[in-house]
Image (cartoon, rainbow, N blue to C red):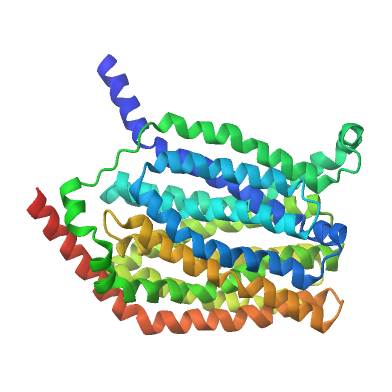
Amino acid sequence: MSKSIAERFRRAAVWLPIWVIVIVSITASVNRQLIGLIAQSVKVEFGLSDTQLGGIISVVSIVVALIVPLLAHISDKFDRHKFMLVSIFVWSFGTATYGLATGYIGLCISFLAIVLAETSVVPLFNSIIADRYRDEQRIQANLIYFAAGGLTTGVGSFIGGLLLHWSAHNMSSVTHFWPGASEWRVAMIATGLIGVPLACMTLILGKDQRQSNHKLVSKISYFADYWKKNGKSVVYFYLSNAGYFICASATMGWTTIYLLRHFGMTPAELGMRIGIVIGIADVFGIILGFIAIKKLYRVLGPVAPRYIFQFSICCIALTYIPLMAAKTSWTFLVFLGVQNFFATFGTASFSNMAQDLSMPGVRAKIFSVGSLISSLAFVPGPLLVGMISDHLGQDPRVVLWSIIIVSVPALFMSFLLYSLTNKNFLLTVQTLRALEQDQQAKAG
């Protein structure tokens, strides 16, 4: 009996890291969605233009792109669990100070701390999964991680709406000891405080114990040699995603602002509605996305997810047509949910595709290339939408037109680059798999 119980605990402990990652991801998503919900309130309180509002994201993305490769190197070299602990504390501090900001520069610095911490843990999480899990376990771990990432958009929006609702109904007691406080500031500080117990949770993981064989790593982890042979394929892969990220940043950054301006909703009401619609869309996107990958993978191999993603890009572009025609907020949200479904459906295997291009010992560095390119891809979208919106006028529908002007050409760029690089990607994955199998055979 005791052996049976011990075995159950041992099996449960294997999945402990992935559940910690899931909890951290959900909390970070609440923060991201909350920042989107309060953007209009921040604009009004600080008297910002649309260009300045979009510029916060763009300027921070450039700085993050320059720093993330260094952080990925640290993640590969030192204990990943301690690195996660520090990142969460930085995120918590940045979130709290965002709620205390007194000017535009303060907003930018606080937002930089938030985004830097969140971006740095993406290669970290992928590396922990790739290091700890193999074969079927890795597929399950990636499924759990992606499902959490997909569902957190809806969950984060709903919880963010609840936080704003709570703040609105407790402002009288808050202003008693904090005169001049606003709802969005209280919600941001409350979210930041969650980071303290969250960081302490990483302590239960103990020391980072990587499954990679040290002899094997020493033979195949020389980054310069890896990059010389495979760097072009890695860059092609992440550049192919860049257009999608431009569209995603433009749409996610400005859709909530459009809804608030055009339909006159409150941030709390909007957050809870988005949470319901996007949450449902993500569930179906995750389930059907993985079913499609599983079925097509048997026929097409590692290139299958890329064809699925190209299909989803076309569908995302088409959803802008009914979004333009939506007359009510609920109609708009339903079609926004459809758009989000195709986005989730298409990106269900990003982690697997990136892991197929990585090797033990340099995983975080490879993922950091993706973080760098995606961070740079997040630069033009929000800024261009803000600039176009300021130029076209004050009509709320101008924001939606600005989103479409930026997003549709960006999606076409991603579709085209994927089409041109599918063959190269497949050849590189096959070569890397053969090399790793050969090195494992020699090491063992």
Q: Quadrant of residue 359?
A: bottom left
From the viewer's perspective, is 128 left or right of 374? left
Front residue (pair 379, 240): 379
From the viewer's perspective, is 153 left or right of 34? left
Q: Quadrant of residue 232?
A: bottom left
Q: Residue at x 9, y 48 (%)?
A: 444
Quarter in which the N terminus is drawn: top left
- Give the image location of residue 270, x and y in percent: 77, 55
Q: Quadrant of residue 47?
A: bottom right
- Give the image location of residue 349, x and y in percent: 41, 62
Q: Residue at x 82, y 40 (%)?
A: 167
Front residue (pair 232, 314): 232
- Give the image location of residue 421, x and y in percent: 36, 80
* Residue 236 to residue 8: above or below: below
From the viewer's perspective, is 285 left or right of 262? left
Q: Residue at x 71, y 54 (%)?
A: 35
Residue most toward the top? 2
From the viewer's perspective, is 12 left or right of 314? left
User: Do we see residue 276 in this rendering?
Assistant: no
